[in-house]
Image: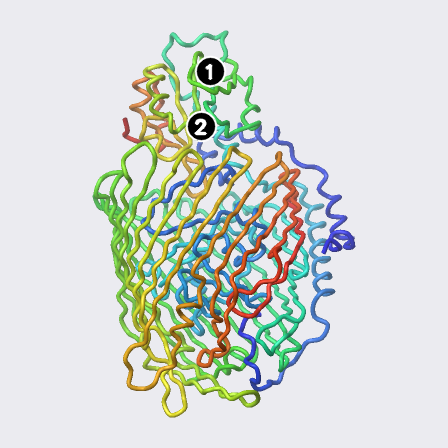
Amino acid sequence: MNGVPPPPGTRPRPSTVREGMGWWRWTLRVGLFCLLVAMVHLVAQTGAGEPITDAEIKATLLFKFVPFVRWPKTTLGDEEPFVFCILGEDPFGEVIDHYQGRIVKGRALEIRRVASLAELEGCDMLFISASEIEKLDTIFTRLERRPILTVSDQAGLGERGVMINFFEADETIRFEINPKASRKAGLKIGSQLLRLAKVIDGT
Amino acid sequence: MLHVLVSNPFSLSMMLLFTSFSDDQERMDRLAQLSIEELISIKVVSADKAPRVLSDSAAAVFVVTREDMVRSGAISLADALRLVPGVQVARIGVDVWAISVRGFNELHADKLLVLIDGRTIYNHLFSGVFWPRFDLPVEDVARIEVIRGPGSTLWGANAVNGVINIITRHASETHGPFLSLAGGNIERGLGIFRYGGALGERTDYRVSALSQFREQKAVAFDPRVRSDDEVEDFHLSFRVDHRFENESSLMVSGEKFNSHGRRPTAPAPLQIDDRAAYLQARWQSDPGADVGHSVQVYIDYFKREREFDWVVYDLEYQQDRQVGNHDLVWGFGYRHIEDDVVRGLAGGFEFAPQKTDEAVSNLFIQDRWTLREGRLFLQWGAKIEHNEFTHEELQPSARLLWKLPGNRERNLWFAASRAVHVPSRLERDGGLMGRIVGPPSPTVEGNPQLDSSDLIAAEIGYRTLLTTGFWLDASTFYHDYDGLVDYERDRGRFRRVNAMKGHSSGVELALEWHHGKWWRLAGSLNYLNMEMELEDWDLPLRDLVDFVENGSPEIQATLRSYMNFGRAWQLDITGRYVDSVVHAALANPVAPPPLSIDAYTTFDMHVGYRPSRRFELSLVGRDLAGENREITLYEHEPSGSVELKIWF
């Protein structure tokens, strides 16, 4: 209903007040809904339509990127694991642990959470978490020319020199690539991946 | 109203049905099999932990996410809008709200434009929005974007003090059955059922039904009027999204709405029966193309039995393209409105002429000019709008965004703009009848010569990430109004004339702070000062200056806390302080009763339990600090409700 209360003393108007409106009728409707839902549920017990989170997509994309990136030969040994490090607060949680032990580039994937730059030794790929943005310059100095693929998901970080940066557009997860940054580190990002990315011309 | 859950055998049987939750492992396996192309085209729900991204617009923008809405336990859009810093929301009936930005709040708040998916829901007859008509399920809303300050260059007339854009979710995001049941002491019962799915590879659809019943006993509407207030609503809506081979897309949506309300014990029994429907289609070209086009058409129909009805036909075209470092958007629109008013709003008004038909057309262009890549942007443009009574209205604006250098993002913006309010049908043609019983009230007649009122606004804003997880948005404004409506007295009758002017100024502050993943605090503080005066006038004027100046709270403050305990539990508390106001005199603008409404502080609480992705139980309490009143005598009683949501 919508409207001002009638000013006191407004002329009474003919009205056809409906009887018995309200509570029980609502209950009846809800009951019918439930019945309908129960039927639909029984017919289509598919369980589709759960919301997929950005973390799930990002975690999956991270390891889909790896085959398109060429690391300098010296750093690769088949026996050693492929180490994916998360620097700072972990935005993925259990989602990413699902990929622990999977084979990427012929090596077993190891997921490592690192709290400080001192623990970077051995990382092949580094996710820079939102909590570390302020230390970005220090991180870059520390990484200087090391063959570590850097990834993040904060606006503007691609331009600042992170190699692959996720962003959201139209409620989908997209990524931008800064090829200059990867070239400096001796990594080569394949054209097939570049084709799917927003390529940025940063530092 | 726990007994909804306990006593309703259907809801119990529901709880037994969702025994098999899908496995997270299986889900990730399925994702891992997709290609990169597929992954980047999946629509996602953003995690609640994502810190707010700084907006790049040179305007005071605030976005309410679905997460915010769910966490506040909002059942109606009006509840969700209480979260927005600088928006004044006042409940004045069991399902009637007055909502405004930067002052001038009343039932027919005429300076705020509201759109749902690009379809304007501001009504030309009385101004403002019939909020209960638009109680869409919060679960179908993707986000609400609120722009404080004029937005006329893009959105046209009546976007004087602000614009609210409600964006519903894409049909691909709402697959599967969804059921929500809620009940409480005012929201007696709410049921939502939605079913969505895909029709082939390129088409998605959903159908939603919402039914609710609200009731409040013996509430005060006036010092002399107490009445029960009860309303029953039913909404049935759908949305279909289709993606063509060439990447262009088509959205078609529609709704059927019925509502029956009554106040049986008012001096005269009041019965309101509303029916409404709309149908909308929007086509958009490939978003990746150099030149973008979009075309939108809709028909909107509303009928209040025994009182009035209207039909709106609307067509809009928009094109965007890049020319060098200019991002250009231009477009045009045409709207045709037919209405028939037997009597307005519970018989309080009579319109002459009874029927009209009017057309509004517009043309606009806006340029976002990159002055320095990544640093400095100038957004300027104008809209020219033609209507049949005030004729051409030019609404230009210029906005400058400066992203300050440094590691931390800091955006500074300046804006100057002009916006107009075009008189509603009520203001032009609506007369208030003298009373037959009760104290005599003056007679008001419409004024077809009434001109638009206009606003020149200057705004400055600043937003920044202070440290990790600490976000600040501040804006200040100076609004200069001319031609506001007052009433002149001519031989015992009153007529609306453009006889008031004045200015308002204010400061709006919003802060947000994340502490890890488990705690988010958000606060806002708004200060508003209005100075009005009457023009020199030949005939005596009714002095409404005091009511306009003091009709909006000078200070409003909110503090919201969102806490996660483990994965399943959420505890959210929202406190708010609203300063005192002078009664806005809705029923009779020419003889307002001199009443002031006290300042109040109250809080709302939400406890959420979500043990899996498919099931959520929430407990919501509102106005828990006790009774309070907002802009009218309507009393807010503490209210509570329980809501159960199931995604099958």
Q: Quadrant of the N terminus of chain B?
A: bottom right
Mark 2 vs mark 1: same chain? Answer: yes
Residue with the mark numbered 1: A105
Q: SS for tag 1?
A: loop
What chain does mark 1 sit on?
Answer: A
- Tell me the amino acid under the disc marked 1: Lys
Q: Residues within 10 Å of mark 2 (few under 14, many from 20)?
A: some
Q: Residue at x 39, y 45 (%)?
A: B246
Q: Tell me where residue B305 appears, x and y as whole percent.
A: 57, 77
The image shows residue B480, relative to residue A46, as above or below, that is below
**First in sequence: mark 2 or mark 1?**
1
The image shows residue B78, relative to residue B219, as above or below, that is above
Frontmost residue, A169 versus A118: A118
Residue with the mark numbered 2: A129
Left or right position of A53 against B526: right
- Tell me the amino acid under the disc marked 2: Ser
Coloration mode: rainbow
Q: Quadrant of the C terminus of chain B?
A: top right
Q: Residue at x 34, y 34 (%)?
A: B408
Residue B584 seen in render: yes
Q: Which mark is residue A52?
A: none
**Based on the displayed image, in which of its 4 quarters is residue B52 positioned?**
top left
Q: SS for tag 2?
A: loop
Frontmost residue, A46 versus B125: B125
Q: Tell me where residue A72 appears, x and y as whole percent.
A: 36, 12
